[in-house]
Amino acid sequence: MAQMLINGELVGTQSGTTITVRNPANGEVVGEVPRGTAAAVDAAVGAAAKAFPAWASMPATKRAQLMHEAARKMHEVVDEVAKLLSLEQGKPLAHAKLEASRVAENLEYFAGLADKLRGDYIPLDDPAKFGITIRRPVGVVAAITPWNFPLTLFANKLCPALAAGCTIVLKPASTTPLATQRAIEAINSAGFPAGVINTLHGSGSEIGDALVSHPRIHKVAFTGQTETGKRIMQLAAKNVTRVTLELGGSDAMIVADDADVRRATAAAAIGRFFNAGQACLAVKRIFVFEKVAEEFMTKFTDRALKEWKLGDQFAADTKMGPLHTEHQRAEVESQVADAVKRGARVLAGGKRPEGAEYAKGWYYPATVLADAPEDSRVATEEVFGPAVPVFIVKDLDEAIAKANSTVYGLGSSIFTKDMAKARRAAEQLEAGYTWVNDIQVAYDQLPFGGTKQSGFGKEHGIEALEGYLEKKSVVLASG
Ligand code: NAD
């Protein structure tokens, strides 16, 4: 059985109860983790608080060395971790390997920044005085992650936290704890002092509240649903704990009349069907100009039908595994059913696949909808699965207005050869990211984070460090 890492030790839980982890492709048990308790939360947070002063004052070059070594350790276990991720999450093995490798890359990126943090010199009116700013780590971080990209999302928190000098308690989703736990054990074996990195397992309702509202937590880094994010904010308010919230999205893609339509359909397909559509940053609504609508629909539908082969996550030709849970599939099915009942046409997919190989898993095919009403659920809610509505618009004004008519503001994209249109979209789309003529892929170097109800605070890039640092002013007067 996997365990929790608390104060440098692998431990179970006093409750003696466990969480069973199952394979979404067939329901088989793939492992178990201890079910954390309030006492475990207290022990993990206490260990992180105890480790904080020494970790924060360790020379940054030494912290960076440990992080480089952790990246090396992570590379050694990429295959093992990827297999666990595939088994527990349902994603194809090749995609799980990419995700596991990215943890090591993320460690390297932030290791490189650890010793480049600086303050400022600020002259003051009084010539006998001057000001400086110094940057101090915020303290103990609680990192709470969802099940869709468990490794990417813990790394997005762990790496800047360590580089900034924070200690951390990580709580992965209770349906995907195994790959995270194994990766953390490998990372920790690089030689981090006890208590710098800790893990806890359990559901949000069991230990999440206790972790977020713990008085010794100084920052909560959360990725998950918008509704959960609102609850986290309320809980954090109790101790005025700072939060970074990476929440849901309903990204719009605009395809203008001068677009390279073939390229747009390729980006739309990857943007919508990768990870079986279970991605925050994903093409969730498509707005196509009338002139190219027919060509777009035909080519995009063709890709959905032919390129996104459903199957077992370990089969070499699988592009899309099962959805993660029965609940997840039921949700997508009911969103599609709502659109169809109200007049949407199903151009691809739209019903569970038939065949014995799909009988035991939560499979759902790549689905394309036309003529969905603008107030149907696929248009107004986040669709966290491989289904997408395509809407026809007359011009950029209409496309931008409709793209912005959502509570979300995570990603967005436009396909056009006209720089004026691209610039307007970049400036006016209400989102944390806009891609022009490109696939929605987040880059380590670029700050990533949402606006509106997609949250606030940045992950990736130098900006990610700001969330883990306090800028302090110091006045120096000559004696
Ligand atoms: P979720 O909100 O149900 O759970 C996320 C995590 O929060 C889990 O670890 C869960 O156990 C924990 N949690 C739940 N209630 C809690 C509480 N009261 N206190 C503390 N922790 C609690 O999200 P999910 O269904 O696992 O993930 C899918 C959602 O995440 C989607 O909405 C998706 O868009 C979003 N997401 C956003 C980003 C981003 O970067 N913006 C990235 C990936 C996923």
Image (cartoon, rainbow, N blue to C red):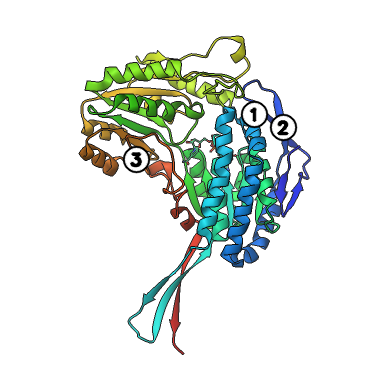
Q: What is the C-alpha distance between the residues marked 1 and 2?
A: 10 Å
In the image, residue 297 sits, relative to residue 89, either above or below, namely above
Circle 3 SS class = loop
The residue that label 1 is drawn on is: 87
> CB atoms at circles 1 and 2 under 8 Å apart?
yes
Image mark for residue 31: 2
Q: Earlier in the sequence, mark 1 or mark 2?
A: 2
Of the pair 451 and 294, the residue shown nearer to us: 294
Residue at point 57%, 63% (across, down): 61
Q: Amino acid at mark 2?
A: Gly
Kindly check if marks 3 and 2 are in contact, taking CB atoms under 8 A apart as contact.
no
Tell me residue 120's x, y (percent): 41, 70
Front of the two marks 3 and 2: 3
* Residue placed furthest toward the top: 355
Dot 3: few (<14), some (14–19), or many (≥20) neighbours within 10 Å? many
* Tag of residue 449: none
Dividing the picture into quadrants, the one containing residue 257 is top left
For the N terminus, the quadrant is top right
Q: Earlier in the sequence, mark 3 or mark 2?
A: 2
The local crowd at label 2, few if under 14, some if 14 to 19, many if 20 or more residues have their Cα within 10 Å, is: some
- Expressed as whole percent of the image width and height from the top left, the position of residue 317 reads 55, 20
Q: Is label 1's Cβ within 8 Å of ligand 1? A: no
In the rendered structure, find residue 434 and report the number of the disc placed on it.
3
Q: Position of residue 345 (x, y in %)?
A: 36, 13
Q: Is residue 97 left or right of residue 40?
A: left
Amino acid type of the residue that numbered disc 1 sits on in the rendered structure: Leu
Residue 252 in the image: state x and y as whole percent.
35, 32
SS at mark 2? strand
Q: Secondary structure at mark 1?
A: helix
